[in-house]
Image (cartoon, coloured by chain):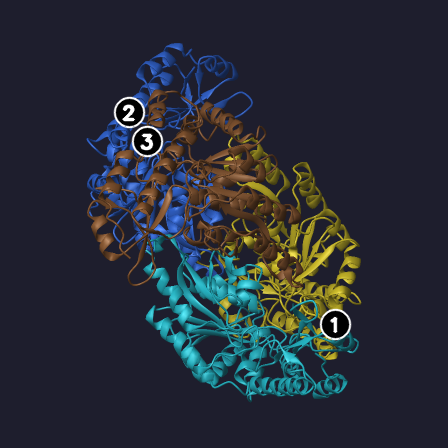
Chain colours: A brown, B blue, C cyan, D yellow
Amino acid sequence: MISFESDYIEGAHPLILESFVKHNYDQVPGYGFDVFTAHATELIRDAAGCSDADVYFLVGGTQTNQVVIDTMLQPYEGVVAPETGHIAVHEAGAVEYTGHKILTVPSHDGKMDAKELRALVKGFYDDQNHEHMVFPGLIFLTFPTELGTIYTKKELQEIRAVADEFKLPVYVDGARLGYGLMSSECDLTFRELAELVDVFYIGGTKVGALCGEAVVFKKGFMPAHFATRVKQHGAMIAKGRLLSQQFETLFTDNLYFDIASHAIRLADKLKAGFAAKGYEFYIDSPTNQQFFIFSKEETEYLAKEFRFSFWEKLDEERTVYRFVTSWATKEENVDRLLAYLPEHRS
Amino acid sequence: MISFESDYIEGAHPLILESFVKHNYDQVPGYGFDVFTAHATELIRDAAGCSDADVYFLVGGTQTNQVVIDTMLQPYEGVVAPETGHIAVHEAGAVEYTGHKILTVPSHDGKMDAKELRALVKGFYDDQNHEHMVFPGLIFLTFPTELGTIYTKKELQEIRAVADEFKLPVYVDGARLGYGLMSSECDLTFRELAELVDVFYIGGTKVGALCGEAVVFKKGFMPAHFATRVKQHGAMIAKGRLLSQQFETLFTDNLYFDIASHAIRLADKLKAGFAAKGYEFYIDSPTNQQFFIFSKEETEYLAKEFRFSFWEKLDEERTVYRFVTSWATKEENVDRLLAYLPEHRS
Amino acid sequence: MISFESDYIEGAHPLILESFVKHNYDQVPGYGFDVFTAHATELIRDAAGCSDADVYFLVGGTQTNQVVIDTMLQPYEGVVAPETGHIAVHEAGAVEYTGHKILTVPSHDGKMDAKELRALVKGFYDDQNHEHMVFPGLIFLTFPTELGTIYTKKELQEIRAVADEFKLPVYVDGARLGYGLMSSECDLTFRELAELVDVFYIGGTKVGALCGEAVVFKKGFMPAHFATRVKQHGAMIAKGRLLSQQFETLFTDNLYFDIASHAIRLADKLKAGFAAKGYEFYIDSPTNQQFFIFSKEETEYLAKEFRFSFWEKLDEERTVYRFVTSWATKEENVDRLLAYLPEHRS
Amino acid sequence: MISFESDYIEGAHPLILESFVKHNYDQVPGYGFDVFTAHATELIRDAAGCSDADVYFLVGGTQTNQVVIDTMLQPYEGVVAPETGHIAVHEAGAVEYTGHKILTVPSHDGKMDAKELRALVKGFYDDQNHEHMVFPGLIFLTFPTELGTIYTKKELQEIRAVADEFKLPVYVDGARLGYGLMSSECDLTFRELAELVDVFYIGGTKVGALCGEAVVFKKGFMPAHFATRVKQHGAMIAKGRLLSQQFETLFTDNLYFDIASHAIRLADKLKAGFAAKGYEFYIDSPTNQQFFIFSKEETEYLAKEFRFSFWEKLDEERTVYRFVTSWATKEENVDRLLAYLPEHRS
């Protein structure tokens, strides 16, 4: 049984495991004071073009969102996010657990619209009772979004303009950052993205690592005593090397982007193959998550040989399923799937 | 430079890395629904003699203490711990962050005394205003303690008796559990320890793993919707295999206990060697953490060739340093240290 | 200058002040163990027809919502509310501060719709990843709503049915409860309302008291150790008499409902008067809050002699203002306002 | 039955009730924007000699401690308090509920010692792992203490010096402030006390008000958006007049201090009377709380005619009881008690 369920079903890129083996008996200090952390930090700063950024490695995506959002906000502030944002739906209330409200704007295929963002923030300041309301304190967006879509440079510039107008920092959840940047439809480089936002995290777990996300705080944006707050959240690990060795590997010789490109190429192939056989898309995703619509019969037939994720029921007849490629996807498996795929009958 | 600073300065036991490599491309579901988690759970249940326990894998020690304590307590309850307990001192207030008070009892070389524990709990119930106080809701102890000491079976039985009298669950932080159980002075088997308490965690990070702690909830003690609460704490990772593969390895063929025994044998050798040269111990530790007292000259001399941890200044002349052995410690390095060690001059 | 800004601009009903004076030197225990609390509890149980309910007196509305919602929810649960609910907008994130998410359903003139409520709750249980989501744990509604509207008996029965289907308790914010129940359009008695819900609070602050809200927990719904949790929230006051003496007065000889009726009669008169002069209503409110639409000129003219609250800008020309009557409103002031009011020109 | 149980068993000073009656129908804005708040603020600034202080009125003592401590601390900080401090014992964990640890120093008859305070703070900064610890962020003390004792000017100056050395603000819980300042043993004026600390609250509930505490933030010490945070804590009330009218009355014509003096005179008389009959004191309190030691027989005999509070069991024979005078205590009742009191037999 071949699975296209998600981008976290395999282990880690082999070069990461090689690094573990090679340096296993190196004795290094704990808590991020190791040489790997220093080196990985340099590599990331260089790739992002932020030579004076602070970089901090955390274990997982929800943890990263929770810690970054909680520590960047003042206690009386909330975070603005699209209503489909991962933090607003599938993180079990991890942001609210830290005492902060999520202020939602409508979602357009997973993305927020700068005008609607502005309306929310301006509406807050225009309200004569705004001292009785949660202050907008941070703008959250995902790149690519939970629906696989990506913001254009222009869209990000418009969001940036709102952020500047109201002096709000912009934070990007980049759980699948590589897949977004390597999309053929992406009109931004990594450095251009980094330029337009204030804080972002580079997802490792879904892009080749066993675990780990690298948070990049541009100059002045890392909260005071951040390490203490990470510890307070239970998010600090003793063997910081576990995270930094992985990012050192991923940011050596362009590995992170090369393996993301591989996934995008196979996602494009998958998409083209499904389109050629007449399948409808739930959304037109240019990244490694593809959403196809199947009838019951099609679902049953495909499930005999392949695994994929239920996404949403459209109506009695039609259901949306998600297929995901990753750094680990083998082209032969994509080919096998497309060969097995029947013509779609509407 | 050879380091005895801590038991988290090397990577992971080689068999763990072998397992990573071997199963790297196995496609398994995320979030702990993988075969490794099922298998590791069985192995741990068997080793602990708790066939109906719930086992949950988390990433690190502070995280584990935070999540377990917060979820086991009612919102109006606090946790009783010795005043030197890790949660009370070196976890940056991670328990208080979740809204719970730590009710402290005196520390006797790191251990709580059952009589003093009983006095605190009874004092609470005797107070006519106890509805204005934090209810004791859980007993926390470390095994071995932060000072390397271990509870005797009798001491744990006495604590158990207090727990039963007041219907309080007992939770054991076993960050270094293996090193405690393998101590020559330990009069408890793993199963006997498990029998005497309600919830405990088996430390992986310090006993051979890259990260990971296995929480064992005896029947009925796992909080409702525990997975959701783990997620809410930002403590769930997508690739659960990272944790479970490590524990599967550690609990296959007695590896966890064998590597702990190795560390204990070398700690005993270190201790005997320092004693033979006339050094004083800050505390008489029977486990893998040893605390020696040096003069300034001794410190400077040793620091030329070895690394070890500052613990505490005793007075103007004397300082306590910690030396730690682990699963990774090489006997030749212990021998080298002892050969280099001068006679102590008081 | 006569003010119609809100129902909390005057002090307390004179009978309350009389009670303060009369019992001022009575020595009674603190923290709610006084005779007034016992008596007020009996009077409220009797009025609501809940002889076995628990009644608890708190100081203000946001506090009451915060304490009740936080203590009724499990830590992994959130509260379902209309998106215009006071807790969702104008309580500065007081619910999120306690760690709970507010799950919003659309607002129809301030009210939730049972079908949309059901869709949200059912959608949660249908989601295969719902362990990664916030569990719906309580249904929150206001009676009357923030927009002055009231639920019909049928609407509440439909919400009750959803609550029963999913075993969710229903909690009613009754900050202006009296004004809702005394509305000529209300088809529910107090006892019928109490019958249909599980927990509700009877607003005092806006209905004749200086401060104070009485929470009624029907049998079995008061959270364990509620007093301790109230204290933990900083919401317990030493002189419980301050609250209970007021409610004792309000629930003696039907005072609470009589003074609410007075306010409703004057609100109806106001509404009829504005309608007769051709003014538009922003919303057709049957309770003590009325929302009128004025041009700039009308606003300026009225503001010379009267005070009223800005509510919302409709467009460049038209703005919504709120006029509120209360237990303290004098009929002569309503008459003066209507006499002063010019014909509306569209 | 005459009660000496506490200073919160009667209502309010009659002049407060008179003010309520007189201004009952004055229409004033809510949420503290009323004229009474402005006037009371001026009166308090003047009495304290802090013309540029911010003054904020809250309802009760635990609420005040919770809100002030939480908002003055950074999220990674804790508050330093004596281990007998009210916040550390009898506030049901209200401070920890907001996520902050209480760092305790030993209690000397309720007071902290500047040297021990300094040792704790310095110990924190000397610890090489202090980034893993809770930062001391505020110094908390009560004046008078929970045991009725008061700090001397010299003691406060020593604490001030530590505060200055480590740049820590000093906050005083003045739940019974008037009784402390009017003690014959107090060597500080109100202005001198205000001069030595940064933030303090003037207790109303126990000194003549029905409820209410006035927090005084010296210039620059009020946290940003304090009103929003008060609201977020559920601590804001709609009718702010309830609090400010009371403080306006208390700080007019020296009323607050005059009624405190009255209580102190009667406490002194009580103390002298008990001493004259040979009773032992549990503590030598110079304020309105007195702690006497009785045998079982004495207790039973006194309890026939008077009510007083159990404090603590000393041994099988002897128990400590608390007798409290207040603004409302009648001299004839003190006389009656002393007349009834038998000679103590040891």
Check if mark 2 and mark 1 are on a common chain: no
Name the spot of residue D17 as percent of width and height, x first: 70, 76
Residue drawn at (73%, 47%) of the image: D196
Name the spot of residue C36 as percent of width and height, x first: 54, 78
**Where A279 falls versus B40 (above or below)?**
below
Q: Nearer the viewer, mark 2 or mark 1?
A: 1
Instruction: Quickly name the residue at label 1.
Output: C296
**Label 2 is placed on what type of residue?**
Pro
Q: Report the front residue among C63 and A37.
A: A37
Determine crowd level at label 2: few under 14, some 14-19, many 20+ residues with C-alpha closer than 10 A: some
Determine if residue A337 is in view.
yes
Determine if residue D319 is in view.
no
Numbered circles on residues, count:
3
Q: Earlier in the sequence, mark 2 or mark 3?
A: 2
Spatial CA span between label 2 and label 3: 10 Å
Residue A204 shown left or right of residue D156 in the figure = left
Residue A297 shown left or right of residue D288 in the figure = left
What number is the disc on residue B209? 3
**Label 1 is placed on what type of residue?**
Lys
Residue drawn at (42%, 62%) of the image: C73
Circle 3 — which element?
A: loop
**Label 3 is placed on what type of residue?**
Ala
What number is the disc on residue B7? none
Determine crowd level at label 3: few under 14, some 14-19, many 20+ residues with C-alpha closer than 10 A: many
Chain identity of mark 1: C
Circle 1 — which element?
A: helix
Q: Nearer the viewer, mark 3 or mark 1?
A: 1
Q: Quadrant of residue C274?
A: bottom right
Instruction: Quickly name the residue at label 2.
Output: B14
**Where B266 falls versus B69 (above or below)?**
above
